[in-house]
Amino acid sequence: MPAYPGPRGGKGRFSVVSSETAKVERAGWSTRAIAEAAAMIALSVVLYLIKIYHLPQGGSVTAGSMIPILFLAWRRGPAIGMVAGAAFGLIQYLIEPFFVHPVQFLLDYPLAISALGLAGFFRRWPLVGVVVALAGRFLCHFASGVVFFGSYAPQGVNPAVYSVIYNGSYLLPELVISLVITYFLVRKLGPLPQR
């Protein structure tokens, strides 16, 4: 890195930092966006800790823990929503780790929860965004269930059917909770605010 500017001026370290900061902000990652993402992740974690019920091999119905990440995706776009979702997924793993294989870890934590960012593609139709986001999350958990948790299926039950039933037993109630909360938020707030 070049030295600090001397008495004659010139480029220094500060100009390199400011040009990198400008690139990050053009990509949508302003200081405000990062602060909003951190706040929404924290709110999601708090709501995640309020469990309605919890399944033995992972998965639970919560008090709308996905809503803050969905809201962030609508407000800031899918990329920021996906990154925040992945961070939230990693925090879920730290709170309740369930590790079988590295691919299972990726499917069940950062990838599945980052799918919530898909809602950002549906700013004009938030209820559709909820369905698409949870469908993406379901597909990640389904794949993990078939490949890594098929041995938990009762004898004679296809692992794919078992994975659909198991993952659907908590994601369907989560979908209903998220749709209801989103419906009332949109009704109360009007069109979802964007950056």
Image (tube, rainbow, N blue to C red):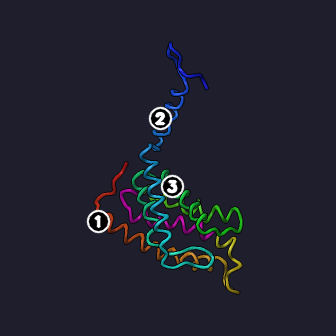
The first of marks 2 and 1 along the sequence is 2
126 in relation to 50, above or below: above
Alpha carbon distance from label 2 to label 1: 36 Å
Alpha carbon distance from label 3 to label 1: 25 Å
Q: Main secondary structure of the magenta part?
A: helix
**Residue range highlighted in magenta:** 122-143
Q: Name the residue under label 2.
A: 22
In reply to whether residue 133 is colored magenta, the answer given is: yes
Q: Give how far across and how far down residue 1 sits, in percent.
A: 61, 26
The first of marks 3 and 1 along the sequence is 3
Q: Mark 1 points at which residue?
A: 187
Q: Residue pushed farthest front?
A: 7
Question: Looking at the picture, which amino acid does disc 2 mark?
Answer: Ala
Do labels 3 and 1 touch, CB within 8 Å? no
Which dot marks residue 93? Answer: none
Question: Looking at the picture, which amino acid does disc 1 mark?
Answer: Arg
* Crowding at mark 1 (Cα within 10 Å: few <14, some 14-19, many 20+): few
Question: Looking at the picture, which amino acid does disc 3 mark?
Answer: Ala
In reply to whether residue 132 is colored magenta, the answer given is: yes
| Quarter of the view holding residue 113 | bottom right
- Nearer the observer, disc 3 or disc 1? 3
* Crowding at mark 2 (Cα within 10 Å: few <14, some 14-19, many 20+): few
- Taking the image as shown, residue 33 lies to the left or right of residue 99, namely left
Q: Name the residue under label 3.
A: 84
The first of marks 3 and 2 along the sequence is 2
Q: Give how far across and how far down residue 92 sits, in percent.
A: 57, 65
Do labels 2 and 1 touch, CB within 8 Å? no
Element type at mark 1: helix
The residue positioned 33% from the left and 54% from the top of the image is: 193
Q: Give how far across and how far down residue 132 sits, in percent.
A: 47, 64
In front of the other: 175 or 128: 175
Do labels 3 and 2 touch, CB within 8 Å? no
